[in-house]
Amino acid sequence: MTSPTALAPATAAPATGLAVTVCRDPREFAGLAEEWSALHRRCPQATPFQTHAWLHSWWLSYATGRDRLRTVLVRRQGVLVGAAPLLRTHRPLPVLLPLGGDITDYADVLVAADDTPSEVVAALALGIRRAARGAVVDLREVRPGAAALALFDAWHGPKRRSCDSVCLELPGLPMDGLIARVGSSRGQRIRAHLRRLDAAGVEERDVAAQEVPAAVATMLRLHRMQWQGRGVTPEHVRPRFAEHLSRAATAMVAAGEAVVTEFSIGGTVVAANLTVLSPALAGGYLYGAHPGLRGRKVDVTTLLIRHSVRHVAGAGRPVLTLLRGAEPHKSHWRPAHLANQRLLLANRPLAPVLHARHALAAARTRLLRTAADRLPALKAWRARLNDLRARRA
C-alpha cells in the first residue's frame, strides 16, 4: 500500500500541531473507512453524501482513466480532524472537483467541530492549494451552512461564488406539525391521503443490510416503470448507477447512515425508497413506485413524507430535505427553497482561468433559467396546437 504524499513541513502549519497530507492512492482511500467515519460523526453539519461509503463507492463506479485522486487529509496527533474528498481531472483544463459527481446532492469538506475548526480549515486550504497546483478548484452543490463556506472565506487568492441547484427543505416536525404549516384546505387533502393509505393497507418494512442489493434492484425496477414514457433520468437506468447505489446503500444501512424501505400491499412490494441519514438531516434520495398505485388513489408523495417523518421528528433531526429539484408535488408541503453554492478557488496565476470558468457557468445558469421561464408558455402553445389539430381531424 502506498503511503500518502506529505506536504512540505513549511506548508503543514507545524505551529498548530496539524499534519497535512494528500491521499493519491485509491487503495489507501479505501482503507480510511474507519477513521473517516469517526470524523464524519464529529461534523454536525456533514450530510450523508460525505460518508466514506458513498464517496468510495462513487469512486469505484464513476472514476475514469483521466481522474486522479487528490483527497486532502488533516490530522492532529494522528487523529483525522479534517478532510477534503477531491479528484483532479481535465475538462478540458485541469480542475479539482469533489468526489461524488453529478449524482451527489450536497458536496462539502469535513471539519471536526470539537477540534479547533479555524485551524483545521486553514490547514485544509493549504493542502488544497498544494493539491491544485495548476488547476482551478470547483466545488459544486455546497449546502448553506457547509464547512466549505468557511474554507472559501479563508482562501487567500482568486475566488468566486455563485448559486447552484435549488434544494427544498422542511423542518423536522411530526406529521401534525407539517400539516399545520400548509393551511386548512391543503391540510384536509393531506389527511384524506393519509386515510387512503391506511385503507389501502400499505405496510412499511426497513430491510436489513444483507437484503439491500435485492431491495435496490426492486426500487430501480419500479422507478423505471414509474417513469416509463415520461422521460426517466438517463443516469438512473445505467448499470454503474445501480452498482454504486447497491454497494453504497448496503454499507450505509449497516452503519446507520441510510434506510432502504419496501412498501407492500397484500404482500406485494408496490414501492421502495432509499432514505439517507446524518445528524443534520434525513432525506429521500430515490424511490420507485408501481404505476398502479394511482388507480388505488394512493398519493406516493404523502406516503414518502410520512415515512421520512419517522426518521426526522422521531430521531431528533432538524431537517427533512427534499433534495434537489422544485417539482410541483413538493411545493404542496410549502418547503423552504435553499440555493446550493458553487465555490471557485485558484492560486493567483490562474485568476484568468477562474474568472472565465465563472463567467461560463453564469451564462449557462442564465440560459437554463430563461428556458425554465419559457417552458410553461411552450407547453401552453403545444396544448393549443394539439387542440387545433384535434378539431381539424
Image (cartoon, rainbow, N blue to C red):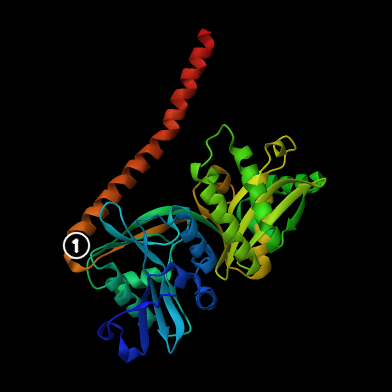
Q: Relative to 214, does residue 385 appear above or below in the rendering?
A: above
Q: Position of residue 1 (x, y in %)?
A: 44, 75
As drawn, which residue projects farthest toward the top? 393
* Crowding near the residue tagged with mark 1, few <14, some 14–19, many ≥20 C-alpha atoms within 10 Å: some
Q: Is residue 205 left or right of residue 4?
A: right
Front residue of 125 and 381: 125
Image: 28 above or below 282:
below
Confirm whether residue 186 shows in the render: no
Query: At which x and y percent is residue 298?
Result: 72, 42
Q: Which residue is mark 1?
A: 351
Name the residue: 65% across, 65% down. 313
Left/right placement of residue 299 relative to residue 267 reads: left
Q: Quadrant of residue 381?
A: top left
Residue beneath the point at 72% across and 49% down = 191
Which residue appears at 31% of the width and 83% of the height?
Answer: 12
The residue closer to the viewer here, 287 or 283, is: 287
Q: Evaluate whether residue 68 shows in this view.
A: yes
Q: Tell how many labels.
A: 1
Element at badge 1?
A: helix
Q: Nearer the viewer, residue 331 or 369?
A: 369
Task: Farthest residue to the front: give it.
Answer: 1
Of the residues shown, which amino acid type is indicated by label 1? Ala
Q: Is residue 48 left or right of residue 72?
A: right
Q: Position of residue 114 (x, y in %)?
A: 48, 84
Residue 91 pos. (x, y %): 30, 52
| Residue beneath the point at 45% across and 59% down | 100
